[in-house]
Image (cartoon, rainbow, N blue to C red):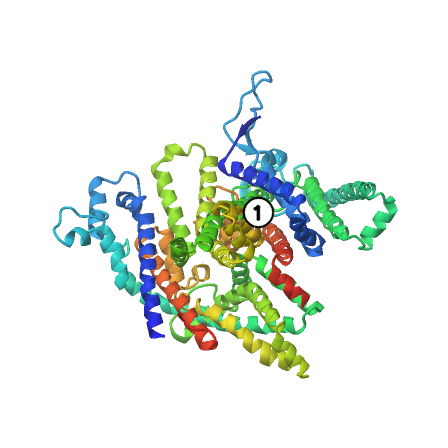
Amino acid sequence: MNLVLLWTDMLVFLLVLAIISFVLVARRREHMRAPWRQVARSRMGMAAAVILVVYVAIGLLDSIHFHPRDHDASADQPRYSADVISVFDWIMDPVRSKVEKTYSAPFATHLYAKETVRLPDGTQDRIYPRLEHGGAHLSDPETQRLTDIATRAGMGLIYALVIWLLAVAVLVGWQSRGLQQPFRRRLADIFKRRTPVPWDVIIYTGAVVIVFISLATQLAPHYHIFGTDKVGADVFYQTLKSIRTGLMIGTLTTLIMLPFALFLGLAAGYFRGWVDDVVQYTYTTLVSIPGVLLIAAAILLLQVYMSNNPEQFSTPENRADLRLLFLCLILGITSWTSLCRLLRGETLKLRDIEYVQAAQAFGVSHMTILTRHILPNVMHIVLITVVLDFSALVLAEAVLSYINIGVDPSMNSWGNMINSARLEMARDPVVWWSLAAAFIFMLGLVLPANLFSDAVRDAFDPRMRKLQNN
Amino acid sequence: MIAYIIRRLLYAIPILIGVNILTFALFFVVNTPDDMARMHLGDKRVTEEAIEKWKANLGYDKPLFWNAEKDGAGQFTDTIFYTKSIRLFVFDFGLSDNGRNIAHDISQRMWPSLAIAVPSLLVGLLLNITFALTMVFFRATYIDTAGVVLCVILMSISSLFYIIGGQFLIGKMLNLVPISGYDTGLEAIKFLILPVAISIIYSIGSGSRWYRTIFLEESGKEYVRTARAKGLSEKVVMGRHVLRNALIPILTGIVVLLPLLFMGSLIIESFFGIPGLGSYTIDAINQQDFAIVRSMVFLGSVLYIIGLLLTDISYTLVDPRVRLN
């Protein structure tokens, strides 16, 4: 394996490191653990978290890129091919490599369009030709197809059941050892909802997830679950690849904007005076430019720059990756203002509280006051904003790609899928599966993200805590 | 009051100058007029003469900030920055890159945008308030929970799906209204129903959830407890006291949007082929017509600043305790 590190990959792993170190720090501090414990007790939030974990896992697997080894090279003299694939591509190879000629419906064995073919007896006829890969193992698709799908699905369900039972047994066994309780008592506690953390919800959601994964592994290598697109590529694979794009936009944007918003917001609120004036002026100016137009201007600019300097963008992957990064950057510039304003307001309040004044009277430096006394007390605002912004950013990607100012057209993303689906919906007969796949997988990410962010906000926002007590 | 408004308007000038310089930098400094000409004239083998001619026609042949060849004021006024950016302050938008008068286009295309934006805002507001009030009335029951879950689901669906789905279902399958297009006069209504309905449905999730929070916050206050203690029925408490007081944050939150209604909705207009300012902007982005994009950026910023000012004024009008200073 010959690893390739794209810019976005690097930032993703930086983000993962940051989250891990945050968890390590927060674990030992009770006041940081308490709100998270409340999140862990929310039934809706935990169900959402299980699904999010699956998405994140796919996104991370799709972020480890490498040059694959050429098949025809000898073992002692490895040669690497020029294209870049990810670990996820490698796992999905049985699906990725199966390219048909053009559109085919989900689970179809024949193309969606008629073609003129020469029959063995020399005459020509217009028929729906067989697919090269979808259902290719069947000798007579008409009669065998449904039974074949049903048996494979049945096998998938059986596997899922076995894996799920094993997983539950391991989980409950591990917990009962930790708690020094008998296995059956812990099991009864969980399913009668007597545990503080709703393990029953986690187990049920896990069951759903395992069933889906198991069905997909049984069916996807033999059929196109979500059909194929115009150039015959598998739509199921495309929509899974889009997960990484969506996650990147949702997280990297925040990662990029966070330092600016934190630094400027805290400085404006703490130092007041001319610093405050400058920061307020900057964000009012930025916020008064319509966001879409600022993004459009920046992307147009990047396009011109790229077409004038083609030598800096060696591979198509590199090009698409830098465009994604640039999009995150520009989305960050348009979205840091609201967080900055919130932080400034909160800092203005905090700096007049006695303990900050006491610190000032002791002669503690500004830097220390800001990092030790103010920053920890505004972190809940940062966290809530970051989590709430995530789903909005994923949705924004789709809209931007539709106006052609989103990610690179060659990159798999839900926005690009929807964009192409617009023409497909106008065809007769309708090609609906690209849109359906994008819809299902996008909802599958955004809905849990919204539910999870609600749980986080309820736990961290003092205003929300007050509302719940009413 | 008047002094306050004048001061705020004066304060807007540096912000607009900032917007202007920023957009100018985005469009001209990194991206030279030569690049623009090459992109507009299409293929890569354009001659130098063609580029010079295109620049001269549209006034891009001047220096960027400082014209050393002229005397007096001409040193400053005969530059791209002055002719293309400073002129925007007197709303002189000039010509688009393919030679149309932008100000005329804007005055024409404003009306279809308003025809969609105003009904969507009003009906949407009414529906959002109704739903939110119903949820708060039945708070902590299954109706409330179901309402919140429905709102979250509605919020989690991309606006593009509502549009494509609506066009497909209502326009193509049921054939109730035309899929896209626009007409003048009363004929326009049949083209407007679907886009208005879709933009309302799209906004209902986040809207009613937000209003629900406002109503909930309001119903936890002391005067509501007093009203209940007096023995008023829940209907009267909600309809009279909570609704009226909660309308203050709701209405002032909407005022900032009012001027921006002129800008139209980018996505809805371009999907439904409505000749408003939103689709104008999208077309300009797709054709890379920087003159139009620049004018729309400036117009948007002016309208946003007006919106902020109106918000502050509306605070004093609805709540006499707030003083402007």
Q: Residue at x 57, y 57 (%)?
A: B157
Q: Measured from the top left, where is residue B305 in percent x and y?
A: 38, 64
Q: Residue furthest left?
A: B71
Q: Measured from the top left, where is residue A449 in percent x and y?
A: 61, 52
Q: Measured from the top left, where is residue A127 in percent x and y?
A: 58, 44
- Whether residue A107 appears in this view of the structure is no
Q: Residue furthest front?
A: A362
| B218 vs A141, nearest the viewer | B218
Q: Residue furthest top?
A: A76
Mark 1 secondary-structure assignment: loop
Q: Is residue B232 above or below residue A278?
A: below
Q: Quadrant of the C terminus of chain A?
A: bottom right
| A57 vs B47, nearest the viewer | A57
Disc 1 residue type (three-letter) = Tyr
Q: Residue at x 85, y 43 (%)?
A: A180
Q: Measured from the top left, where is residue A301 in percent x and y?
A: 36, 45
Where is mark 1, residue-wise?
Answer: A112
| A402 vs B174, nearest the viewer | A402
Using a 10 Å C-alpha cutoff, classify the residue at mark 1 as few (fewer than 14 neighbours), some (14 to 19) or many (20 or more). Answer: many
Report whether B230 appears left or right of B97: right
